[in-house]
Amino acid sequence: MLAVAWRDVPAQPAYRVEDETGLVFAGFVTFADPLVPGIAATLAALRRDGVQVKILSGDDAPLVQRVCEQVGLGTQPAVTGVEVDRLGDAALGRAAERATAFARVSPAQKHRILLALKARRHVIGFLGDGVNDAPSLHAADVGISVANAVDVAKDSADIVLRERDLGVLHDGVLEGRRAFANVMKYLLMATSSNFGNMASMAAGMLFLPFLPMTPVQILLNNFLYDIAQATLPTDTVDASAIRRPQRWNVAQIRNFMLAIGPISSLYDFLTFYVLLAVFGASAPLFQSGWFVESLTTQTLVVFVIRTLGKARRSRPGTPLILASAAVVCLAWLLPLTPLAPALGFVRPPAGYYAFVAAAAATYLALVAAVHRRVLAWRVPARRRRWRP
């Protein structure tokens, strides 16, 4: 708000402060920066989905607190720049976790608040549009600017919004979590299956007078498996995996691999025994039989790994269902087709297919039990701090 006043004075080359006396008050000029429609609902949705929103402003505390009230961020007093300067880095990190708004803070103080939160293992998204926001945009895990921001702010940002709509950010958060969940499905499945297959191959070569599977068959196995998994980006994701933040956890992937991989190898060794002891398999029959069992189990296990709950209660995406069914059918039918001799396959006995079906069913049940009870995707609560 500006006060406007006037006074007639003779024209002169320069004017002095003393000339600004005896003025006639004309009125006030007010400037308004209205809130974006729907912002309160958007912020509520972000909070519901585990994203904390904090305001860092150079405006006075009463104004900042009023904005917080209007957008539903509460009535907690704003922390001022003077208070920020009094706090050490550790104390500032704790204060920043508790506070919702900061008022009368300089760009350097914004940057310091951001670093204090990062030091406490928070993942930070920072939204800014001014020249002075560039350091914070660059330091944030995700820098966000808008289309009408200054060039240096847009250059420092990772994301530039074309419109002033935070709903886009909320949609992006949820879509990112969907993508992350599907990536985790593939990593958990691929690492455990590959670990088990490599162990089975190495062990088989120690006591078999022939290769457990020929190089061509291994390549074909991997090619068909990858075709099925290429549909994973379209898979549906459980609401529980979207409504809370997830973080990259290498230890979790390692532990899953070490737990599920041996189960895969156990069923491979069972298959080896059945092929040799029950069916008296020659080298081509052994290789054909393991190809069918290996590709069947590692293709179907995604339907167990893809959810923390019971598989029957979480419907997979249609492309994943169709692709997986097609690959399993190919695995079973290839040894029966005219292509079999060229690939080194022979026709397995009908009884062997019954064994594969039973083995796959029990394998999936065992993996489901281990997955649900031992290797949940969730990061332990004491380490799960993700609050942009």
Image (spheres, grey):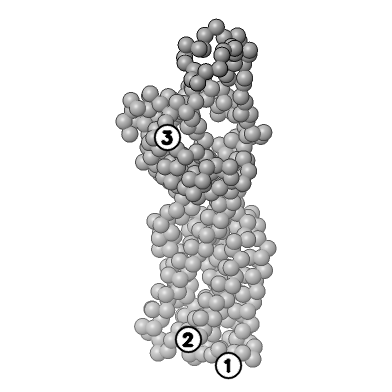
Residue 103 position within the rendered picture, expressed as x and y whole percent measured from the top left: 46, 26
Residue 34: percent from the left, percent from the top? 63, 29
Residue found at x 46% / y 80%? 273
- Where is 65 relative to 306, above or below? above
Is residue 88 shown above or below 20?
A: below
Write down the quadrant of residue 338 in the picture.
bottom right
Q: Nearer the viewer, mark 3 or mark 1?
A: 3
Q: Nearer the viewer, residue 270 or 24?
A: 24
The residue indicated by pointer 3 is: 107
In-image side of 71 versus 109 (left or right)? right
The residue mark sitting in front, 2 or 3, is 3
Q: Residue at x 48, y 52 (%)?
A: 377
For badge 2, the amino acid type reads Thr
Q: Residue furthest left?
A: 88
What kind of residue is marked 1?
A: Pro
- Front residue of 240/48: it is 48
Front-most of residues 28 and 65:
28
